[in-house]
Image (cartoon, rainbow, N blue to C red):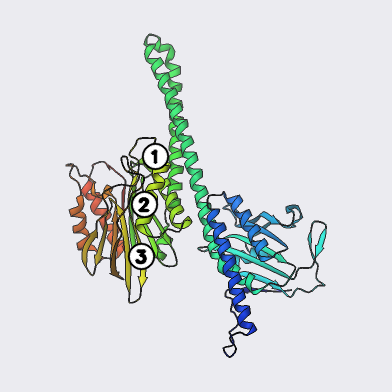
Amino acid sequence: MQPSSITNVSLPLVDTSNPLSAKTLRLQETTDIVQKWADELDTLLRHSFDNDLHDFTASLLHFLAYRCGAYRGCWFSRSEDTTATSFVLKHTFACSEKHITTPQYSLGDGLIGQAALRQEIVIFDQIQPNLSPYKAGSLSFSPQGILILPLIFGAQTLAVVELVFLQPLSDAVVLFLQRSRSNMASFLESITNLMRTKALLAETQNQKEILRAQEEELRQNLEELATTQEALKDKNTEITKAFEELAVYNNRIMQSLAYGQRMQKAVLPSSTRLTKAFKEYFHIYLPKDVVSGDFYWYAQTKEVKIFAVADCTGHGVPGGFMSMIGNMLLNQIIIGQKIHQPHEILSRLHKLIYNTLKRDENAGNEGMDIALCTLEYLPFDKVKVVFSGAKINLIYSKQGVLDQLKADRHSIGGMGLHRILEFRYQEILLNQNDCLFFATDGVLDICNDFRRKFGQTRLMAFLQEYHTLPMAEMGEKLKQILADFQGNADQRDDVTMIGIRL
């Protein structure tokens, strides 16, 4: 039994002397089959976006095994244990988990671990019948083909799928799995992140309710102490205990906020990811409190790169709630529903926030301002930038001249707005080495000791003077200028500023 790993599948050339040759027909049949399966997979992925991770992976294994004609199959997921990377059996197809002799593999251990380490599809074919047969329950069988499929996102193996066949592997099966595994891995990563976000929101809401109950209990205790001033000496022990409980509660609150801060940072695009995405960039991200109401978001499709900066209503815990909702909804719209036009994305985002916050029933001004653009790299070092914005302008430098695209003057999800809201489509053509800048109003509203704001004029003057500097140096210089301007004054809002060189 000889293993082979593939990175590309080459189809046979068509005999041009005979357009209706058998090879041409086989090629067309294979192409049609692969496209049909890919369409079915795309439908499954889109309909499974709201499922939990366990149901999604189980349905995906069943689809792959059934569609590819496998006799049995196994799904191994990457372990959440951070001490050592391993892959644990989560689902089986046409066999019982108790009959799987090795339910867990370390990275590089066995065929599953090797496939995860090398991140390549592994195929066994031409299996000799005298080798030990596979066993499933009380049945024994001699497989004719084995395919091990690692699902890769970024540089990380998320899961490994093993499929066993009683017939030789067809070109259609191999080509379909090779072409589809990137799409499956992307959806797997998106659903994993969505599950984490939902867990964080539920935990944060639970902590908020606990805090509210504890605060109410403490308030009642303090009121009782105030009415019994004459017995103050007898209540000293009770007061001391109340303050000790308050310190414990405060410590728990701070721990919960610190956990929320870590989770909020985890869903933001990493420095490594932005470094790979753009030639140069800088970012200034200064929450007013532990968690922030500002966030930035990035994704890439085959055609465009998509980037957004948003400023949610409020700061601290309320702003943090809105930022997590906004991040989750952008994932749903752009990755799940595959809407990639900026003005359509913002209209859809407004509608979802309007429905999520039940604006028809509940009054409130919770929402967000946002700037969102797509970047399409064209021949001759040109870059098409399509922009739509809600109260956050897009500042850009084109061949050394600073200008900006104005955003619409209404927020997303705000009070008094209709459920349906449209945004303008704006397009500019830039050159590589031109720059884009995104700033929330926290930058402009920084006040000094004399209560004067930093303002749009100072920001534009700084960008005009220093936009030719390397982005990292420019970001550090702006951060220092903002700190010097603020002096000893308190920070009034979350501050976010992003600069990108194309």
Q: Which residue is mark 1?
A: 317
Relative height, residue 449 to residue 210 (above, below)? below
Disc 1 residue type (three-letter)? Val
Left or right: 101, with 483 as reference point: right
Query: What amino acid does circle 2 point to?
Result: Ser
Q: Are marks 1 and 2 in contact (CB under 8 Å)?
A: no
Residues at marks 1 and 2, CA–CA distance in whole angstroms: 26 Å
The residue lying at 43 percent from left, 40 percent from top is 257
Query: Which residue in the protein does label 3 denote?
Result: 375
Q: Residue under circle 2?
A: 347
User: Would residue 235 be found to the left or right of residue 122 on screen?
Assistant: left
Residue 53 % position (x, y)? 57, 51
Of labels 3 and 1, earlier in sequence is: 1
Label count reads 3
Q: Is residue 107 above or below residue 13?
A: above
Q: Give the answer, above or below, for where 50 lies relative to 386.
A: above
Question: Of callouts 3 and 2, which one flags the residue occurring earlier in the amino acid sequence?
Answer: 2
